[in-house]
Image: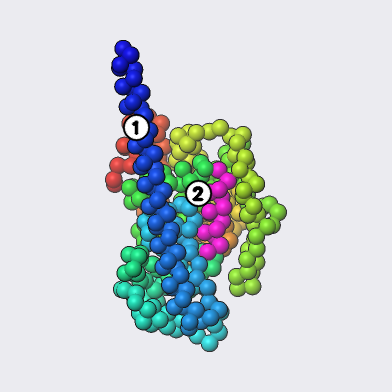
Amino acid sequence: QNREATSGIRTLRSKGARSDTLRGHRVSSQLDEIVKQEQLLFSLRNLVTKEWPNAELHLYGSCANSFGVSNSDIDVCLAINNSELSKLDILLRLADILKSGNLQNVQALPHARVPIVKLMDPVTGISCDICINNLLAVINTKLLKDYAQVDKRLRQLAFIVKHWAKCRQVNETYQGTLSSYAYVLMCIHFLQSRKPAILPCLQGMKVTYKAVVDDIEYSYYDQVEKLHNFGAHNKESIAQLLWAFFHYWAYKHDYTKDVISVRIAGTISKHAKDWTRRIGNDRHLICIEDPFEVTHDLGRVVDKFSIKILREEFERAADILQYDPNPTVTLFEPY
Ligand code: CTP
Ligand code: MG
């Protein structure tokens, strides 16, 4: 019996050692990735500032908002104040500069919804998309990152929801479903609405961060290191929250009347925003207000077919988490 007990301990110890090694490996490969990203950003900055000394390059999206999985591709925004050149001219000039700088597959896509230059860096192997003056994306990237630092359940929930959305093919804006950015906002809104709240309303607190874009000021509270205990009164587990998230979007949300708003940590009526009827291609069938660009409904890509698909997927997920004996498999079954 003693021998069994000792060998049990040994097995446990060796498992522990193995997971430490795995964790060590993961941390070092994450570090590798960050170092490579910095290296690429450094050489891009060198190239760009030779032509435009006052231009800046910022990371945005999942490589910088802390909601990305390991994947070394990066999204970059070129911030440039140049009244002589049109945005198109800047984009084309940027592509020329990059081509002369030993980068591969440089391609300008001026007619994309967000015009970009794509490239691949042969030194680090990283692919990169560069957009011009999309500074609100840089600011909302910081907002998401700041919210993630308040309570770790936000990242846990958002990772699962993003993974679910990709498996179930409801993360494709060109097919009328929602962007990852929209899903993260839905998670933030949901955690702000728990009782007691798990996340605060950073845009409703004392201003500690300000940025000006096109003469409009955007501000919020960003001293999130002081908010580490904010959600401590709420003891809900990630399993409970995941079910409640899907249950909310399946059965509780009022799709005919409500707009969700992270900016006010609540809902606003569609009527108040004048989002009650279809204007052009904007149908407002599920309404998610952008926290800074408040006239922008992130649900505007959703049409009368995809809203049905989305709502059926929310119901499917809620029902699986409630009744399925093996939910972790069924929930993510590829569509
Ligand atoms: N963005 C935005 N407005 C949108 C969609 C996206 O401002 N309607 C910006 C946000 O800054 C967002 C970034 O573009 O962080 C990238 O969006 P998206 O690809 O949806 O999110 P990621 O976090 O990059 O998710 P994924 O890992 O799926 O690429
Ligand atoms: Mg992305």
Q: Position of residue 117 (x, y in %)?
A: 39, 74
Q: Earlier in the sequence, mark 2 or mark 1?
A: 1
Say if residue 210 shows up in the picture: yes
Magenta stretch, main secondary structure, is helix
Q: Secondary structure at mark 1?
A: helix
- Tell me the residue at 33%/14% (across/down): 2
Magenta stretch: residue 120 in it?
Answer: no
Q: Which residues are magenta?
A: 138-151
Label at residue 186: 2
- Disc 2 and disc 1: Cα gap in Å? 38 Å
Q: Is residue 136 rendered to the left or right of residue 183?
A: right
Q: Nearer the viewer, residue 4 or 188?
A: 4
- Tell me the residue at 55%/43% (across/down): 151
Label at residue 1: none
- Tell me the residue at 65%/60% (across/down): 209
Question: Which mark's residue is nearer the viewer, 2 or 1?
Answer: 1
Mark 2 Cα shell of 10 Å, populated few (<14), some (14-19), many (≥20) = many
Q: Secondary structure at mark 2?
A: helix
Query: Where, by quadrant of the figure, is residue 82 drawn?
Result: bottom right
Q: Which residue is mark 1?
A: 15
Query: Where, by quadrant of the figure, is residue 333 drawn?
Result: top left
Say if residue 310 shows up in the picture: no
- Tell me the residue at 53%/54% (across/down): 145
Q: Amino acid at mark 1?
A: Lys
Residue 106 sits above or below residue 125 on the image:
below
Q: Nearer the viewer, residue 222 or 100?
A: 100
Q: Position of residue 155 (x, y in %)?
A: 48, 46
Magenta stretch: residue 147 in it?
Answer: yes
